């Protein structure tokens, strides 16, 4: 399930020359191991433009020179820099030549404000490549400071105040954004792998995100760790086929938490599909996939969410936590296992909410319904053939005014049998 990424241990020589040099390129502008000539070690970043390849000392210097349609291709190296793709640099690709195992971007985020190792403020930008072949390892090498407020992002999208469209983050390994070790943090802040705001049709796919961790001293609160978060105003994001793991926040409760994927605020039309999320741990709130976006449609399908736990109540730790209301919410085809609760419903949902055709397995609670008076959780498999409450099955917990309908239920796992199982009519 988990793609393994190697770590480059030796630092490359310092880059001293800023001006680009020109390297011979084969047809199509390829260089290095793709058929052309590589750039020298002093200028390891290729800018492929109109059939030619120029060489630059840093990723940022190549981005600064790029035009629409260009590719910035980084040869294997450790790049000690923060990278910004600013407004106006639309329709460029920034990727590695050989993938995240050999190519690292190590940022310097001190935690004094909103900071990203890679910030994307332009539209139609691709960071990385499909299926993990030409992305980067992205991490923070600095020890974060202790300001009153901060946001630390591995990849930040749309933070300059404009609207970005069609950004793709694919095939990267994003980790250790609070620094190389869990650090004591105070005040309000976020520590996350990917964060987006003011983004339309952003796609976060085929990445490995984690570990992401933060540790708070006694008396501190309001620090949250995320694998992927959309907050503010976003439209139609797609979060798919990512491996998101080891998201942890230790610290006092309430006011702290760890979340694998979070769809918050006015984020509409989100699709969260085909992800593997595991080891999401917190002293307080924890969720594999969470919706805090009221009144907007959301689809959560075909994910595996495992080992989500906290030291708080079951409502604070769930494979899927639903807080939004008033629009179509679909949670189907998911495998929820070894979580404190498989699904927690923390606000009244609409009549068009569908929690059906999921596999609940080995959770102390399958569905924890805190708030919805008419929750439809029919046609799910509860870990055994006899339905909720039977020996070996997950349970359903209704907290007034919650009421959950779970009959008919499925008597076979939808994942093991490839279909919807067989309905049962007794609980």
Image (spheres, rainbow, N blue to C red):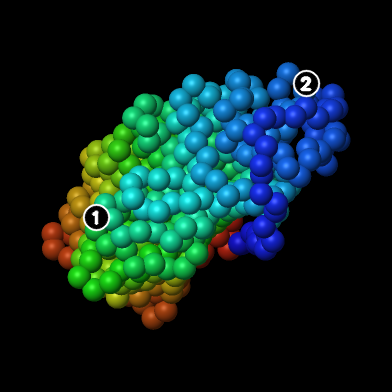
**Residue 294 in the image: above or below residue 69:** below
Q: Confirm whether residue 256 shows in the render.
A: yes
Q: Position of residue 357 (x, y in %)?
A: 44, 54
Q: Residue visible at 50% across and 36% down?
A: 84
**Position above or below: 181 against 244:** below
* Residue in front for this viewpoint, 422 or 308: 308
Residue found at the very far left of the displayed protein: 401
Residue 219 pos. (x, y %):
20, 70
Q: On residue 271, which mark appears?
A: none
Q: Secondary structure at mark 1?
A: loop
Question: Of residues 197 and 423, which is closer to you in this image?
Answer: 197
Disc with the residue nearer the chain's start (1 vs 2)? 2
Image location (x, y in percent) of residue 59: 61, 38
**Going 73% across and 18% down the picture, which residue do you hit?**
50
As drawn, which residue projects farthest toward the bottom?
Answer: 391
Q: Tell whether 208 sits left or right of 134.
A: left
Which quarter of the rendered picture does the C terminus lie within?
Answer: bottom left
Which of these two is toward me, 45 or 387?
Answer: 45
Instruction: Give the crowd class for mark 2: few <14, some 14-19, many >=20 residues within 10 Å.
Output: few
Q: Nearer the viewer, mark 1 or mark 2?
A: 1
Q: Is 86 left or right of 26, judged from the image as shown?
A: left
C-beta proximity under 8 Å, tags 1 and 2: no
Q: Is residue 59 above or below residue 21?
A: below
Identify residue for label 1.
148
Q: Which residue is mark 2?
A: 51
The quarter holding residue 395 reads bottom left
Question: How far apart in space, not on screen, are marks 1 and 2 (Cα)?
Answer: 49 Å
Query: In the image, is 117 to the left or to the right of 9?
Result: left
Residue 427 drawn above or below residue 99:
below
């Amino acid at each position: 399930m988990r793609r393994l990424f190697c770590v480059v241990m030796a630092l490359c020589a310092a880059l001293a020359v800023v001006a680009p040099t020109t390297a011979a390129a084969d047809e199509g502008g390829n260089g290095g191991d793709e058929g052309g000539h590589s750039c020298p070690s002093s200028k390891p970043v290729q800018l492929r433009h109109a059939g030619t390849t120029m060489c630059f000392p840093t990723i940022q210097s190549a981005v600064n020179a790029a035009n629409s349609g260009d590719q910035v291709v980084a040869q294997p190296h450790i790049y000690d820099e923060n990278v910004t793709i600013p407004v106006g640099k639309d329709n460029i690709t920034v990727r590695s030549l050989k993938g995240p195992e050999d190519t690292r971007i190590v940022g310097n985020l001190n935690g004094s404000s909103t900071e990203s190792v890679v910030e994307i403020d332009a539209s139609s930008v691709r960071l990385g490549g499909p299926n993990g072949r030409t992305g980067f390892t992205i991490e923070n090498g600095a020890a974060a400071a202790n300001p009153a407020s901060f946001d630390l992002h591995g990849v930040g999208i749309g933070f300059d105040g404009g609207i970005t469209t069609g950004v793709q983050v694919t095939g990267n390994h994003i980790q250790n954004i609070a620094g190389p070790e869990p650090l004591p943090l105070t005040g309000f802040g976020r520590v996350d792998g990917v964060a987006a705001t003011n983004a339309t049709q952003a796609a976060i796919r085929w990445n490995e995100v984690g570990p992401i961790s933060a540790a708070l001293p006694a008396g501190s609160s309001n620090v949250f760790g995320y694998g992927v978060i959309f907050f503010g105003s976003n439209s139609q994001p797609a979060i798919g086929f990512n491996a998101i793991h080891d998201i942890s926040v230790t610290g006092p409760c309430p006011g702290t938490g760890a979340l694998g994927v979070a769809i918050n605020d006015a984020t509409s039309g989100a699709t969260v599909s085909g992800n593997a999320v595991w080891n999401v741990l917190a002293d307080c709130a924890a969720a594999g996939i969470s919706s805090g976006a009221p009144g907007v449609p959301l689809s959560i399908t075909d994910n595996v969410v495992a080992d989500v736990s906290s030291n708080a109540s079951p409502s604070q730790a769930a494979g899927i936590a639903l807080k939004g209301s008033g629009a179509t919410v679909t949670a189907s085809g998911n495998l929820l296992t070894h979580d404190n609760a498989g699904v927690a419903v923390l606000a009244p949902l609409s009549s068009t909410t569908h929690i059906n055709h999921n596999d609940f397995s080995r959770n102390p609670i399958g569905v924890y319904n805190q708030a919805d008076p008419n929750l439809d959780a029919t046609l799910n498999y509860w870990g055994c053939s006899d339905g909720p409450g039977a020996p070996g099955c997950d349970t359903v917990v209704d907290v007034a005014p919650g009421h959950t309908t779970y009959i008919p239920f499925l008597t076979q796992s939808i994942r093991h049998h490839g279909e919807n199982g067989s309905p049962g009519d007794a609980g």
